[in-house]
Amino acid sequence: MTGVGQRSLWRDAASRLAANRAAMAGLVVVALFAFVAIAAPILAPYDPAAGDTRNHELDPFWGDPAYRSAAFPLGTDQLGRDVLSRLIWSARVSLLIGFVPVSIIVTIGVAVGLVAGYYGRWADLLLMRAVDVIYAFPELLFVIVIVTAARGTWIGELGSGIVLIFVSIATVSWVGMARLVRGQVLALRGLEFIDAARAMGASDRRILVRHVLPNVLAPVIVAVAFGVPGAMLTESALSFLGIGIKPPTPSWGVMINEGFTLAIQSPWPVLMPAVCISVVMLAFTFLGDGLREALDPRA
């Protein structure tokens, strides 16, 4: 008689995540926005940078019938640019801002945390003092300083300022990931399975890659789920302040900045990108909470 095999931690976590309705709703919303971002050239009805002042400040389809057009279902901004097209293209920029810096943060933070936590002594002292120096600065203020200082340089011109935002967010935010991973490694390195692997002649590299890293992935995944919307919010704040993405490249933060001066006359060019930011951040929050519960061994 064959016994029922025990499920792995990851399969068990996946089943618990699938049972979490809020997390799955968040995953669906994130997947929908990702699809919109990827298919932006196909879905957007107009060029997001092309405007026509003859059709400026049109209301969305639920607005005043005298100031709306069937050709622009979500209206136009003060330069006559289609709001729907700009929202669609902004999804691509905002999600790119969310995922690329977080990928850099994970790469640097995990590497530093593994080395500092596993080797300890001088490596831990040196790396953690560097982390403490960066961690002492307010994160958003540090990003603003970096972006402002490098905005006129060659890196500030790449991709309408997108590359500079990648670098600035990653430069500031990797320290949190490093501290998280270091704490996990410190709790693991004295356990029996690590001692057993070392006694069997496993190299430090093999122990870190095959034994330590898989056991710290759960909190890293949760941190990524919360880090992506954080990076998107940082970009939106920078663009709202006028030091983020350079026009005419659209992003939700840029749209809020450009529509803010006319918000009293027509609030929709500000409210719609603000709603998009809120919905995506809420979706990632639900997904992050679900991942935290699903990957918690105590659950």
Image (cartoon, rainbow, N blue to C red):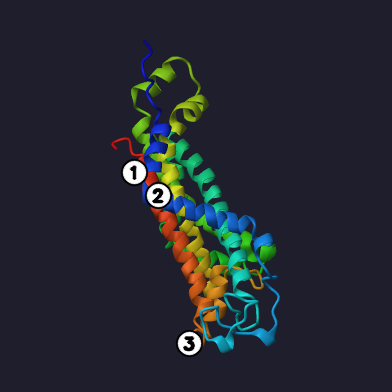
Query: What residue is disc 1 on?
Result: 293
User: In the rendered structure, which disc, 3 or 2, sits on the residue that comes first in sequence?
Assistant: 2
Number of labelled discs? 3
Residue 92 image position (x, y, % from top left) = 60, 60
Residue 119 image position (x, y, % from top left) = 44, 32
Q: Is residue 165 left or right of residue 297?
A: right
Q: Secondary structure at mark 3?
A: loop
| Quarter of image, res 281 | bottom left
- Determine whether label 1 and label 2 are within 8 Å by CB: yes
Q: Secondary structure at mark 2?
A: helix
Front in this rendered view, residue 191 or 287: 287
Residue ranking furthest to the top: 1
Residue 203 image position (x, y, % from top left) = 50, 22
Q: Is residue 239 left or right of residue 215?
A: right
Q: Residue at x 51, y 77 (%)?
A: 270
Label 3 crowd bin: few (<14), some (14–19), many (20+), radius 10 Å: few
Q: Is residue 141 above or below residue 258?
A: above
Q: Residue at x 48, y 52 (%)?
A: 28
Query: What residue is disc 3 on?
Result: 264
Q: Residue at x 47, y 58 (%)?
A: 229
Q: Mark 1 or mark 2: which is in front?
A: 2
Q: Give the spatial CA distance, label 1 vs label 3.
A: 43 Å
Q: Quarter of the image for the C terminus: give it.
A: top left
Q: Residue 274: in sight, yes or no?
A: yes
Query: What residue is disc 2 on?
Result: 23
Residue 103 image label: none
Q: Is residue 113 above or below residue 94?
A: above
Q: Is residue 207 above or below residue 216?
A: above
Q: Give the spatial CA distance, label 1 vs label 2.
A: 10 Å
Q: Quarter of the image for the N terminus: give it.
A: top left
Q: Secondary structure at mark 1?
A: helix
User: In the rendered structure, which disc, 1 or 3, sits on the residue that comes first in sequence?
Assistant: 3
